[in-house]
Image (spheres, rainbow, N blue to C red):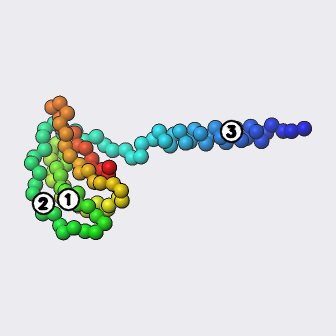
Amino acid sequence: MTSIKPVRLLGSVLAVAITCAAALTAAPAFAQAVIIAPMAPPPPRVEVMPAPRAGYVWDQGRWRWAQGRYVWVPGHWQPVRVGHRWVPGHWVQRGPNWRWIEGHWA
């Protein structure tokens, strides 16, 4: 006589594994806050880019919207991701507002 308990257990394990896999693939890799400003950012400041640094790419300074006004954030080094290129963050106008698009590797 054969028991069906191992078959039920295997079926339950597979169902849980498939559910977990579906949840993990549907979840975003990281969450980002959406930054929206009611007015255009000031012109970028002129920053002197430091000498090249092996294994890093320079991420230029930018205007950040904070507490109802723009605040300057100086540039910094980003570690290189092999096989990718750095796309700097930038402001994009959407109707009367401005939205910040975070810098990312592409």
Identify the residue shown where x is 74% and y is 37%: 8
Residue 89 visible in image: yes
Disc 1 marks which amino acid?
Gly
Judging depth in this view, the residue of 68 and 5 nearest the camera is 5
Q: Which element carries disc 2, helix, strand or loop?
A: loop
Give percent across and percent down for residue 26. 47, 39
Disc 3 marks which amino acid?
Ser
Per the model, the C-alpha gap separating discs 3 and 1 is: 52 Å
- Res 62 label: none
Q: Are marks 3 and 2 in contact (CB under 8 Å)?
A: no
Q: Quadrant of residue 14?
A: top right
According to the image, label 2 marks what residue? Answer: 47
According to the image, label 1 marks what residue? Answer: 75
| Crowding at mark 3 (Cα within 10 Å: few <14, some 14-19, many 20+) | few
Q: Is residue 82 above or below residue 99?
A: below
Give percent across and percent down for residue 98. 18, 38
Q: Is residue 58 left or right of residue 2?
A: left
Per the model, the C-alpha gap separating discs 3 and 2 is: 59 Å
| Crowding at mark 1 (Cα within 10 Å: few <14, some 14-19, many 20+) | some
Disc 2 marks which amino acid?
Glu
Q: Are marks 3 and 1 in contact (CB under 8 Å)?
A: no
Q: Quadrant of residue 5?
A: top right
Disc on the earlier residue, 3 or 2: 3
Q: Which element carries disc 1, helix, strand or loop?
A: loop
According to the image, label 3 marks what residue? Answer: 12
